[in-house]
Amino acid sequence: MMIGKAGPATTSISTADAASITVRGRDLCGDLMGRVSFTDYFHLLVTGREPNAEQRFFLDLLLVAIAEHGLVPTNQAARMTLAADPGSLQGAVAAGILGCGTVVLGTAELCGRFLTEARARTDAEGDGALVAMAAAIRRSGGKVPGFGHPLHKPVDPRAQRIFALAGERGVAGPYCALALATAPAVAEAWGKPLTLNVSMAIAAVLLDLGFPPTLIKAIPILARTASLLAHLAEEQARPIGFLLAAHAEAAIAYEAEAD
Amino acid sequence: MMIGKAGPATTSISTADAASITVRGRDLCGDLMGRVSFTDYFHLLVTGREPNAEQRFFLDLLLVAIAEHGLVPTNQAARMTLAADPGSLQGAVAAGILGCGTVVLGTAELCGRFLTEARARTDAEGDGALVAMAAAIRRSGGKVPGFGHPLHKPVDPRAQRIFALAGERGVAGPYCALALATAPAVAEAWGKPLTLNVSMAIAAVLLDLGFPPTLIKAIPILARTASLLAHLAEEQARPIGFLLAAHAEAAIAYEAEAD
Amino acid sequence: MMIGKAGPATTSISTADAASITVRGRDLCGDLMGRVSFTDYFHLLVTGREPNAEQRFFLDLLLVAIAEHGLVPTNQAARMTLAADPGSLQGAVAAGILGCGTVVLGTAELCGRFLTEARARTDAEGDGALVAMAAAIRRSGGKVPGFGHPLHKPVDPRAQRIFALAGERGVAGPYCALALATAPAVAEAWGKPLTLNVSMAIAAVLLDLGFPPTLIKAIPILARTASLLAHLAEEQARPIGFLLAAHAEAAIAYEAEAD
Amino acid sequence: MMIGKAGPATTSISTADAASITVRGRDLCGDLMGRVSFTDYFHLLVTGREPNAEQRFFLDLLLVAIAEHGLVPTNQAARMTLAADPGSLQGAVAAGILGCGTVVLGTAELCGRFLTEARARTDAEGDGALVAMAAAIRRSGGKVPGFGHPLHKPVDPRAQRIFALAGERGVAGPYCALALATAPAVAEAWGKPLTLNVSMAIAAVLLDLGFPPTLIKAIPILARTASLLAHLAEEQARPIGFLLAAHAEAAIAYEAEAD
């Protein structure tokens, strides 16, 4: 059975025959291998185009910025999974990637949507729209994506560095400006400043560089895969997965509920 | 409860405080961001050291070589998963990574083990050991990892290119030599030549570059994540996931078994 | 670091000491094992209470209804994953479960939300609210969850059977009535009847039985796990995973895009 | 491309047309729904046959025995994943299932292989074979699957209960006898008794009931899915996922390694 309506039965990513592999119209072995970096290739694979110098620089920068942050929940979940199933590195990586959701790692995507809406609203209503948007989110009990951090206060040093480099290299455009202008609007709505974090910086720079908003989440997912592989290599050599679980379990009490 | 014996309660990958993040002893924001590429950072994360020029070159080369090969089963599984659950890009990536097993994508790890054993055996017994190893695997009904390919015959152009570059740049060492010398041993045991494929080339070069054998599988996993993200971006824009499933389903007949 | 605000550090599901395991206040070995069925135990685990006779009957019924539907995309994704990584049954099950999303298998959850809203709206506005809701969804380009099926037309025999049994056994209440009353509202909005499918029947009966709406999705997930295990057992014995992928791949053409 | 050799393009699990669904040769809606329990249906799906009374009793018993054991690593990994990605219940379940490996939850499969080999060896060599097998495993630095438990000492109450019911109901056969006879062999090899745990009891009873060895692992996977859904329902209502991660992280120190 066919679920939904069928569209064109085509792919534009790659094809292969016995002697060659063609990726995005280029010969993999004769042209790409040995010439392009993995970052270039990632850009080519997902967008169909090789990056220009600034796209390459900032793609590397953002992947490096978001990849690793110690024993965050996703890395812990992956290490516990490898401890339980040491035969499947891919299973442990998958467990870690599954935590790339709206709360911790995948927030950049929400930031991208916020900035897209913010741009439309400020274009139509002027800069006051940011204050109105933040206040409306606050009233509805929500959070402005990209604001607040459990550790980095009052600033997230990664966000600071990203905005600085975007400014220096002339790629900061309307989305970086909107991201920075959202900070006082959030502070007004919450009655105190909240940290402008790395996820907002990632989204703003990607949009200013012309990335499609739907690709934003690909950055933290690819970046975190590298970090997961590092944690899992360490777990294989010097395991702490079960130790993490033992300490966590010890902190929680069983409390029966009445039937 | 503590499962197994507890080892040292430490990690050497990273730590953070309110104002900074330290990765492998380096300041993430002040030193790494904007200076190192994502490939460099991946090497630093997993090995604790920044790559030298040849390590960087070949790490990029191998990641580019293995990332993408069209509508392979892992990319199909991921596209079907996204079609079924469009809200979770990370879930679809995870589904794709889970296929990085011994049969198709994760074979490089088995190649690494084969080469490690082959080196020990040929050191002890001379070059005839390769013929003996291949013949023993054949007799037991097994396969020599890294030989054979469903499409690329008689050569896998990626393997050819990798060995060529390893030779040109002077990094080909004993493991590349063993990989190439295994080909005639396999041909003798099977009575016909089998394609020396990309997984064996990846394993051989990584070992010649001094990578720990346990890290070999990290390469196809990271590489394939980039490819999965490209297929999933295309799936979001021009879906074929359900169409793939409809064609596949149509090819299989239901045949009741007697109770 | 603590992400978000910490709530009570307790769990009410189970605890254990050297000699016993206590689940939901009952002794696992002395009381539950050998007395309760797996379906009873599932109900106890997730709700904290053992089911009454009707809850047990319908929990079994709904799990049986939704578990299996042939080579659907989730079962295909799982079979391809096992073919690629035969060493990890759990990895292939996980790949299959990941497709339990909003489009195909997890729709029951959306049906539950629709019915909850429909109840509030019809209570406030009368029965005309259903027509208004369906028309509004149609205008916004959406779908009413639980309506339409790629194969079962004009009726989904599973939905029919569930509603029949719910009626016979006296458990059909306001939510079953709302589900059935939504069918003509949908037909009006779409200008043709759409199949009232199994996901809507599952949600309606669960809500009429007093299940928390947040538990609805647990039913298809547990049910599909049983089906996945059957497909994977068959895959181990008589593999078709790569054959599915070959037929699917053959149906898609590569079409280069202009740069 | 077709990976490997194609076998028959058939499935024997189910088929469907517009008006009906046929599972294992039975009409799902007319025959199975409302008549069979989920446990019966699981047996039918995976084996092609409905269970007899003892198969049903013990399938329920074993699923209940292994489903839940508190904040074990797999449940923690799932709770952390849901905390990070609250929108995907299926993703969190998948993360938990991925830990069903050789060390903690999936051990029953290894027990099944051990018992199968033990039966062949004791048939050929007499009962002394068990001592020889245990001693050989000890010498090679391995573990006898199904022996030892981090909490339950000197006995695992679940194993005790399973063996007692298997004896009472007359289903204990050669595999239960072998499992029990392995305990003194292990005690001799290790110089101290080790707990005969629930995984060995599950494997022994399943083999005595005539289950295929390859199906053993399906039991803990299905059982744990029920437990994961309970923990995730509790996590949605009263979250502890990030609290678990905070306590675990606090127990681990960063220790830089020399370059």
Image (spheres, coloured by chain):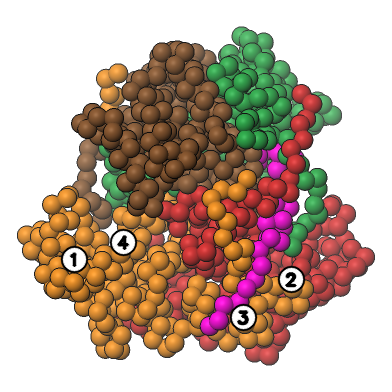
Chain colours: A green, B brown, C red, D orange
Real-space Cα separation, disc 1 to disc 3, in angstroms: 44 Å
Q: Which mark is residue C72?
A: none
Residue at screen point 65% across, 24% down: A27
Residue span colored magenta: B231-259
Which residue position is annotated with label 1?
D195
Real-space Cα separation, disc 3 to disc 4, in angstroms: 33 Å
Tag 2 subunit = C
Q: CB atoms at circles 1 and 4 under 8 Å apart?
A: no
Tag 1 subunit = D
Amino acid type assigned to the residue bearing label 4 in the image: Leu
Query: Marks 1 and 3: which is nearer the front?
Result: 3
Q: Is residue A37 above or below residue C178?
A: above
Q: Which mark is residue C197?
A: 2
Which residue position is annotated with label 3?
D25
Mark 4, other Cα within 10 Å: few <14 / some 14–19 / many ≥20: many
Residue C187, position as x, y percentages in the image: 88, 69
